[in-house]
Image (spheres, grey):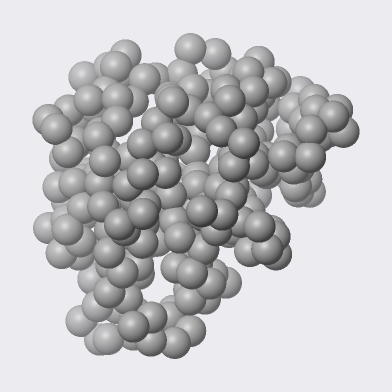
Amino acid sequence: MKNILVCIPTYNEKDNIRQIIEAVLKQGQDIEVLIIDDNSPDGTGDIVKSMEKTDNRIHLLRRTGKLGLGTAYIDGFKYGLTMPQIGYLMEMDADFSHNPDYIKQFREEVKNADMVIGSRYINGISIVNWPISRLLLSYFASKYVRWITGLPVKDPTSGFKCFRREVLQLLNLDKIKSNGYCFQIEMNFYIWRAGFKIKETPIIFIERQMGASKMSKRIVLEAIWGVWHLFFKKILGTDKNIIKRDPR
């Protein structure tokens, strides 16, 4: 099995960054970390740069400013696809809401799937420390996405995932335009429509203890309207344009 590259976007995560990198790397010698930092003014990128000098499994991709979550992952995936030793790419948050201990679980699950999603809703609701308003918003948003698009995923906005390298190679990543939660939905939708095998694996999501949430009204609105964009692409058959060639 080739190495796994864990892609972690950051913006002002100096309180978490050293600990999350160390926790991820502890999951095995086949694990590498790519931090995609949006020029954090708090010095997050500088901390990663110093760590990168002492461990060749740590990589830093600096960007010019706060360009958004979706583009951070796209840039991270493109970076990872240039690394011949990488066979799998993961995405996760820097704030420990995604427990690095689950990486071993993803490693096993992806042996029999093309993409594995860490699901908060596969076994009921597995979220800790969210206010009831945000919990209800997320839960019913997931149902809304499934109803509009037909996507057979219980947690379509989860940002904890593992992809086979070949899946990302077959997608035209430049055509993915969403940035917030809708980015996760859009990636799931195109991968599903391409006929790849998707597996959900249960996780417990724990709200961040340090730093500030990146949630905004704009992100929510993008997701609400973005699913209709995907719906019409599905109806018109234009969603297949994102696939470079038939994966099967």
Q: Kindly identify the residue that appears in the image at 65 percent across and 33 percent down.
A: 11
- Vertical comparison of 13 with 145: above or below: above
For the C terminus, the quadrant is bottom left
**Residue 185 visible in the current orientation:** no
* Residue 75 image position (x, y, % from top left): 65, 57
Quarter-of-image position of residue 97: top left
For the image, the number of numbered tags is 0
Residue 52 lies left or right of residue 176; in this view the side is: right
- Vertical comparison of 57 with 127: above or below: below
* Residue 52 image position (x, y, % from top left): 81, 34
**Residue 26 visible in the current orientation:** yes
- Vertical comparison of 170 with 55: above or below: below
* Residue 131 image position (x, y, % from top left): 27, 17
- Vertical comparison of 80 with 172: above or below: above
Q: Kindly identify the residue that appears in the image at 57 percent across and 18 percent down.
A: 211
Residue 198 lies left or right of residue 37; in this view the side is: left
Q: Kindly identify the residue that appears in the image at 45 percent across and 60 percent down.
A: 164
* Residue 223 image position (x, y, % from top left): 34, 52
Q: Which residue is nearer to you in this view: 188 or 11?
A: 188
Q: Which residue is nearer to you in this view: 158 or 180?
A: 158
